[in-house]
Amino acid sequence: MKAIVCNEFAPIEKLSFADVPEPELNAGEVVVRVRAAGVNYPDALIVQGLYQVKPALPFTPGFEFSGDVEAVGEGVQGVEPGVRVMGMAPAYGAYAEKVAVPGVCVIPIPDAMPYSDAANLACAHGTAHHALKQRAQLKAGETLLVLGAAGGTGVAAVQIGKAMGARVIAACSSKEKLDIAAANGADVLINYKDQDLRSAVKEITGGKGVDVVYDPVGGDAFDACTRTMARNGRILVIGFASGKIPQLPVNLTLVKEYSVIGVFWGNFTQAEPQVYADNLRELFQWYQDGKVHLVTDAELPLNEAPAALTKLMQRDVKGKLVLLP
């Protein structure tokens, strides 16, 4: 079968599209024919050796996928061959025509749900959901500022913030991106290329500041947010798409009495599997109710994975990308 292979931690263009052995089926596992694989920022970091985890080489990247169950190992319950599923590959491997994962890592999806949506729902929306619900404990009526609000996880945060009853301020670097945020429910828009983010937030909130910041960007935007927080506010640290990991002046957290909260969705899914399952059920309900939906920038063939990851790293993606083996 064909797969994307990382032979060395190196620039993205070093990835290869190659023939690899089909996955073996072990007890407790299922083999899934992958119909769509989600493209996520950690994928781009992992293959360059820049992520918290470094898999043994060589390996196939990708952890978010959807497809059809081909085979079921001994002891697996709840799925059978032919069932459409979405899943997570804990040992990576989703950028391939087939993947073997523990049976507990897949769940059936509705017949009406496109494979691309199923492949892209868990990570971006799952991250935003966990961040806003468990980590920030966002309340109806609070003000939520979403940085990078046109990216996959930013769009998800806008949608979920609205579903939870917040007033959502979207911050992006262009009018085109702000239009996407507005189409997904943002109440107020800030173009931080043309406007001073700190001043704009102060004006919008009448000097109060924001209750929650959802920050997958880092860099200068984070620095501005440290000075725009309301009392008892929460800054959610999601990632550093800007490429700059900021430094926090902790005296501001003392004077303004706000919290800085780290969000590592992958760790959450392992540490609190029951809460994660409850979150997924709520996300599926919101999806079926139309409160959340997937914004897919492009569907690309599997062999274009390097181009997809490069596009993602350049912050040139509106919503999500998906690979189709």
Image: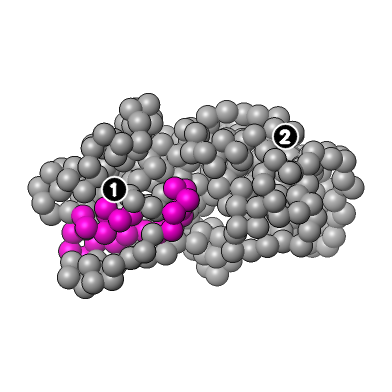
Spot occupied by residue 69 in the image (x, y as percentages of width and height)? 76, 44
Is 86 left or right of 171, judged from the image as shown?
right
How crowded pointer 2 is (Cα within 10 Å; few <14, some 14-19, many 20+) is rated as: many
Region in magenta = 222-245
Is 286 left or right of 210, judged from the image as shown?
right
Q: Earlier in the sequence, mark 2 or mark 1?
A: 1
The answer to if 241 sits in the magenta stretch is yes
Q: How many numbered discs sit on the rendered protein?
A: 2
Query: In the image, which disc is placed on residue 302?
Result: 2
Q: Which residue is mark 1?
A: 145
The answer to if 182 sits in the magenta stretch is no
Q: Residue visible at 24% across and 61% down?
A: 233
Colour scheme used in the picture? one colour
Dot 2 falls on a residue whose secondary structure is: helix
Q: Residue visible at 34% across and 38% down?
A: 172
Calculate the distance from the C-alpha at mark 2 to the C-alpha at mark 1: 35 Å
Spot occupied by residue 16 in the image (x, y as percentages of width and height)? 78, 41
- Work out whether residue 197 or residue 23 is closer to the camera in this orientation and state it: 197
The answer to whether any part of residue 85 appears in the image is no
- Work out whether residue 275 or residue 22 is closer to the camera in this orientation and state it: 22
